[in-house]
């Protein structure tokens, strides 16, 4: 009986601990991006070449290693393109819900070929975070 009690006491923290999900959102663009959301979590503003860490997210729906949700963000003094299909690429891979892990994403401002009613527009999308290696100095 003592061994069983000891085993339960040792394993209890493993089963009672909450899942930890850490999401880092990088803004490698030349724009300050405002009103950033990760799924339904409001992140706020991310200055150009900066990042923000989201710790209060309990789950995230992902597909092709990026969030499934549409990217919700705004670029100051620019007109956002509102398309009904969303800004994510259609994939054959099924979405998965993650509840733990350390995930890193880049925001990407797409301004290519989005021209509507005589105005240039933009769309913000997710990309996998790519770490840029600094050049070694001699």
Image (cartoon, rainbow, N blue to C red):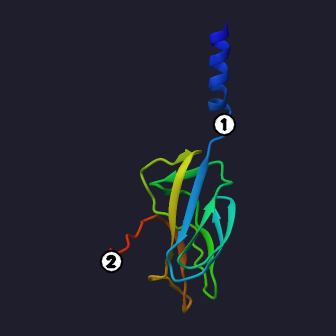
Disc ID at residue 17: 1
3D distance between C-alphas at marks 2 and 1: 44 Å
Question: Which residue is at 62% across, 72% downward?
Answer: 73
Left or right of 131, for residue 78: right
Q: Residue at x 58, y 57 (%)?
A: 23
Classed neighbour count for the residue bearing mark 2: other residues with Cα under 10 Å, few (<14), some (14–19), many (≥20): few
State which quadrant residue 27 falls in: bottom right
In the picture, residue 137 is in which quadrant?
bottom left
As displayed, is residue 49 above or below residue 38? below
Question: In the rendered image, which residue does mark 2 sit on?
Answer: 137
| Residue 86 visible in the displayed image | no
Residue furthest bottom as drawn: 118
Which callout, 2 or 1, points at the residue further toward the start of the chain?
1
Q: Residue furthest front?
A: 138
Residue, x 62% and y 42% (percent of image)? 19
Question: For numbered disc 2, what is the local secondary structure?
Answer: loop
Residue closest to the eye, 27 or 91: 27
Q: Quadrant of the N terminus?
A: top right
Badge 1 marks a residue whose secondary structure is loop
Residue lying farthest to the top in this orientation: 1
């Amino acid at each position: 009986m003592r061994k069983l009690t000891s085993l339960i006491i040792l394993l209890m923290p493993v089963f009672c601990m909450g899942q930890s999900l850490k999401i880092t959102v990088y803004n490698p663009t030349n724009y300050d991006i405002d009103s950033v959301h990760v799924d339904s979590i409001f992140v706020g503003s991310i200055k150009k070449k900066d990042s923000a860490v989201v710790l209060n997210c309990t789950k995230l729906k992902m597909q092709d290693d990026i969030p499934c949700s549409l990217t919700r963000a705004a670029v100051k003094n620019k007109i956002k393109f509102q398309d009904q299909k969303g800004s994510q690429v259609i994939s054959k891979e099924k979405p998965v819900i993650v509840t733990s892990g350390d995930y890193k994403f880049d925001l990407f401002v797409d301004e290519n070929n989005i021209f509507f009613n005589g105005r240039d527009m933009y769309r913000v999308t997710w990309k996998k975070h790519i770490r840029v290696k600094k050049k070694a100095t001699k």
